[in-house]
């Protein structure tokens, strides 16, 4: 008799848990869709503003490729949120987002959107110990299962992907810089590379570049020279919570 009474209760419990799980999945899906729409809105703002300026400019002597690299007007973002330091983009990938910088609260945007509200996706942010002028800019972003944020960064584990996407664009108030990827590495979240921001001299710089190049998953044939600023993209990848993948690039010299 007791078994007959218990079974319905167990069934109800399982049903309740199932409904709760479905509800959480639906809620998370909606939140991620809202995040995607939010970033699309930000992208529209910076491209529309620049297109307006280009329309007002009678003389346009830039080539299509040059126009593509200068197609962002970040002023509206800087005015809307002073924490925004720039925009990062890996052409022809999903990586196309603003970058936040809050050195006094480095992970402020880990789970916040551009408006400061809760967001499961967060926003890419610059390491709190970095400065725009340092030798190694470290930018963090989530590896989202829906293919957004820094999910595409994990694809660099395949050399063929690097061959198709060798450059990263990072634009700030000082202008656009293009960085060439030279090393991809699996690391832990406490890896010494995360402590490298500024080299004391050329020897130290070359030592760090040599170290990360030797540890890289594959050889790109490119070795940065002292004076070239480095850009590191970091995201979660692996079975353990401490597992990361980093993609390291060096600023291209002006033509």
Image: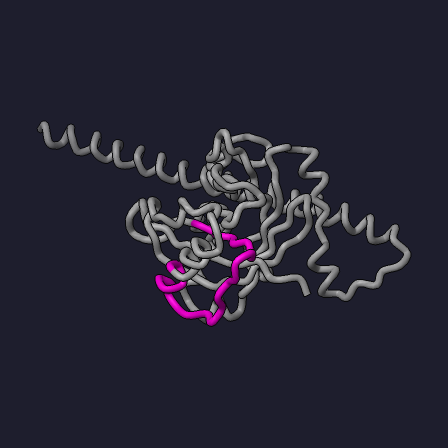
Q: Which residue appears at 44% of the width and 50% of the height?
A: 234
State which quarter of the image contains the C terminus: bottom right
Q: Which residues are magenta?
A: 211-234
Dividing the picture into quadrants, the one containing residue 251 is bottom right
Front in this rendered view, residue 33 or 71? 71
Residue 241 magenta: no
State which quarter of the image contains the N terminus: top left
**Residue 158 percent coordinates (x, y):** 42, 67
In the picture as drawn, the residue positioned furthest to the right comes out as 58
Q: Is residue 122 above or below residue 164?
A: above
Q: Is residue 57 above or below residue 30?
A: below
Left or right of 63 on screen, residue 35: left
Q: Which residue appears at 40% of the width and 46% of the height?
A: 194
Q: Taking the image as drawn, is residue 30 in sight?
A: no
**Residue 30 percent coordinates (x, y):** 51, 40
Q: Which residue appears at 35% of the width and 56% of the height?
A: 186
């Amino acid at each position: 008799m007791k078994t007959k009474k218990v079974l319905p209760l167990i069934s109800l419990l399982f049903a309740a848990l199932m409904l709760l799980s479905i509800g959480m999945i639906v809620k998370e899906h909606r939140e991620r869709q809202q995040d995607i729409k939010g970033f699309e809105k930000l992208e529209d703002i910076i491209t529309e503003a620049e297109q307006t300026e280009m329309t007002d400019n009678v003389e346009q002597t830039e080539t299509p490729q040059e126009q593509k690299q200068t197609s962002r007007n970040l002023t509206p973002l800087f005015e809307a949120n002073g924490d925004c330091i720039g925009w990062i983009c890996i052409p022809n990938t999903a990586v196309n987002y603003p970058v936040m910088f809050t050195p006094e609260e480095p992970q402020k945007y880990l789970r916040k959107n551009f408006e400061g509200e809760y967001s499961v996706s967060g926003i890419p942010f610059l390491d709190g110990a970095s400065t725009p002028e340092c030798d190694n800019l470290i930018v963090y972003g989530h590896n989202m299962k829906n293919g957004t944020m820094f999910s595409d960064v994990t694809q660099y584990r395949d050399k063929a992907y690097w061959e198709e996407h060798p450059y990263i664009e990072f634009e700030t108030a000082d202008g656009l810089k293009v960085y060439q990827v030279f090393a991809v590495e699996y690391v832990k979240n406490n890896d010494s590379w995360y402590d490298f921001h500024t080299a004391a001299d050329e020897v130290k710089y070359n030592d760090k570049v040599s170290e990360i190049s030797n540890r890289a998953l594959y050889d790109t044939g490119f070795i940065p020279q002292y004076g070239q600023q480095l850009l590191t993209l970091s995201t979660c990848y692996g079975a353990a919570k401490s597992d990361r993948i980093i993609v390291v690039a060096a600023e291209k010299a002006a033509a």
